[in-house]
Amino acid sequence: MAIIEIEDVSNHLEKGQTLIGLDLGTKTIGIAISDLGMSFANPRPVIKRRKFKLDAEELIEVMETEKVGAAIIGLPSNMDGSQGPRVQATKAFVSNMSKLTDIPFVFWDERLSTVAAERALIGMDVSRSKRKERIDSAAAAFILQGALDRLFSLTGDNTAS
């Protein structure tokens, strides 16, 4: 499938589908899944990166299991808005994924998402070692929650449809 804008997500969702939030790192892919009411982003275990084919297979399996209708993926722009190598890697990942699945992708500005996720984990008194394990999924949840909040502001309800 193609890349769509957040405003078009509701046109691509069917009843009973969820959204997935992704934080694409070099070593892991952070994952969060929305509830059916499109109100809350729930962190899930990360995918440990290996090779693209294996990562894609695992991600597609998660998306099928969770009945995902669209994917929100963090776009790691620089603080000044410019696009560096991480943005290009994210766009290449989405381009390759779109050859394997019909699920549409939405790019979402993820600047400061990891910082916000780490602050939240610190606020919950999560130890440093456990924060390292959970940071990518927490960042994915932060990305997805921002998208869910935007959908709510667009539709006036939490069903996104």
Image (cartoon, grey):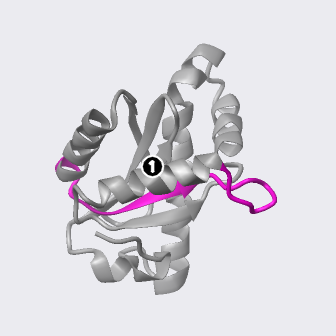
- The kind of secondary structure element at disc 1 is strand
Q: Residues within 10 Å of mark 1 (few under 14, many from 20)?
A: many
Q: Specify the quadrant of the image occupied by residue 124.
A: top right
User: Where does the image place residue 32, in percent across and percent down from the top left?
Assistant: 41, 47
Image quadrant where one finds the C terminus: bottom left
| Residue 51 picture location, percent across and down | 33, 31
Residue 161 appears anywhere in the view:
no
* In the image: residue 35, left or right of residue 88: left
Q: Choose top left, top right, bottom left or bottom right for residue 131.
A: top right
Q: Position of residue 128 (x, y in %)?
A: 65, 17
Residue at (25, 51) in percent of width and height: 63
Determine the residue positioned at 63% across, 32% down: 121
Which residue is denoted by mark 1 in the rendering?
A: 22
| Number of numbered discs on residues | 1
Q: 60 or 40: nearer the eye?
A: 60
Q: Is residue 1 above or below residue 130?
A: below
Q: Residue furthest right?
A: 80
Q: Is residue 32 magenta?
A: no
Q: Position of residue 135 (x, y in %)?
A: 57, 32
Q: Is residue 104 above or below residue 26?
A: below
Identify which amino acid the numbered label 1 is placed on.
Leu
The residue closer to the viewer here, 150 or 37, is 150
Residue at image coords 70%, 33% = 123
From what the image shows, is residue 68 above or below residue 114? below
- Locate the N terminus and report the quarter of the image it occupies: bottom left
Name the residue: 48% across, 57% down: 91
Q: Is residue 47 visible?
A: yes
Range of the magenta residues? 65-84
Image position of 1 (left or right of 79): left
Residue 77 drawn in magenta:
yes
Q: Nearer the viewer, residue 39 or 137?
A: 137
